[in-house]
Image (spheres, grey):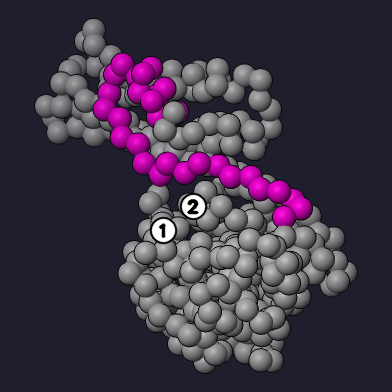
Amino acid sequence: MTIADHDAIAVLGDLVSTPSVSGAEHEAVLLLVQRMEALGYRTRIDEAGNAVGTIGSDEPDAAEIMLLGHIDTVPGHIPVRIEDGALWGRGSVDAKGPLCAFTVAAASAELPKHTRLVVIGAVGEETPTSPGASLVSDQYRPNACLIGEPSGWQRFAIGYKGRLLVHARFTQDCGHTAGPIGSVAERGLAWHRSLTANLQEWNLGHDGQFDTIQPNLQRFNTTSDGLQDSAMLTVGLRLPTWIDPRDLERDIRSISRDGELKFEGHSPAHRGSRSSEPANALSHAIGVLDGRPTPTVKTGTSDMNTVAHAFDCPIVAYGPGDSTLDHTPHERLDLSEYLRSIEVLRTAIPMLANDLSGRPELSATAPSVVS
C-alpha cells in the first residue's frame, strides 16, 4: 500500500489532537484502531486497553516483528498546530510520533512471505507499572522488536537505564521550634543524605551516566495537622545494568533505620548489541537515505525495560523526535523528520524480516501468543 505524505501527517495530527493522559487513553486507542483498519490491519483492543494491529501472515510459525509504541502521555495541554514545519502538541514526540511512524511504515512495507508485523499502541507507559507493556510481555514472544521512542531519524537506542522509585515518610508529634527535638523536615533530609552517601559507595569503580546509579529528588513536602508533623520524599533512581532493582531495595531498607519506605517501578536496565538484526537493518536503511546511523543508550526508561527480558529477542528503540522536548511545554515534532523516519522503517522492515527468516530456530517457532 502506498501512503501519501499528507495522509501520514493526518494520522499523526489526529492522534496528537486526541488527549490520552495515562489512565484515560481509550478515545485515542479507538482512533488508532480505526486508522489501522483503514490501512489494512487486523485490529483489536486487548485486555489492558492496548491498540493492537496485525499485518502480514497469520500462520502461527511466521516470523514475527513487533513494533511496540505507547499511546499515553504525561499531563499538560499544548495547542495542536503546525508552525514552521513542526507539529506542536502533547505526545507529538513522546511518543505518538514514533507510534504513527510505526503504523504507517508497517502498512506500506513490502513483507516477505511468512512474516507478521504486530503494531501496538500501549497504555500506561508513563506510569511506574506500565500495564500495557506488562500484558504484552506476558502474551507475546516475537522474533525481533522495535520500541517506539524518539531518537531522531539517524539514531537508534540499544539500551535504557533501569528505574526504582522510593517513597519515604516521616512523622512525629508537633513541638515548638525552639524545643530540643529537631523538625521532621530535618529527619527527611538526614535520610536523604544517608541514601546518597550509600549510592556513592555503590558507584565506586563505575563511571559515566549510563554506568552509575543516578538519584533524583522528585518530591519533598511537609504537612501538619497541629498534632503531628509529616515529611514525604520521593526519590527516583536511574539504574545501570549491573544492579538489580530488588537488590538495591533490600540495601536501602537495611540502611534506613528511620521512616516508612515504599518502593515501586522496579525496572531493570537493558543494553543490547549494536550489531543485532534490528540494529543492522536500521543502520542500513539510514545509510540508504544518506544519514549517519548512530547507536546510542538512554538514561531514561521505556517499555524496552518491561519487555526485553521476557521477549529475549533482539530489540532496539527508534522513532522521530528530539527527546529533549519530552514532557516540556515546547513539545513539537519536525514533520520532515517524521516522514524521513517512515522511509527508514519502510526500508528496514523488509531487511529485518529477511534476516530473521534465515535464522534456523524459526523453522520450529512456537505460536507468538503465550497462553
Q: Which residue is mark 1?
A: 138
Say whether residue 344 is left or right of residue 266: right
348 to 242, vertically: above or below: below
Whichever of labels 2 and 1 marks the residue nearer the N terminus, that label is 1
Closer to the camera, 267 or 138? 138
Estimate the spatial distance between the alpha carbons at disc 2 and disc 1, rounded to whole Å. 7 Å
- Quarter of the image with the N terminus is bottom right
Residue plotted at (52% across, 81% down): 58
* Labelled disc at residue 310: 2
Residue 263 in view, yes or no: yes
Q: Where does the image place residue 225, in percent across and percent down from the top left?
A: 14, 33
Which residue corresponds to the image point at 66% horizontal and 85% vertical from the top-left? Answer: 108
User: Which residue reaches farthest left?
Assistant: 227
For the question of whether residue 36 can be seen, the reply is no
Q: Secondary structure at mark 2?
A: helix
Q: Amino acid at mark 1?
A: Asp
Give the magenta-colored segment's residue range.
248-276
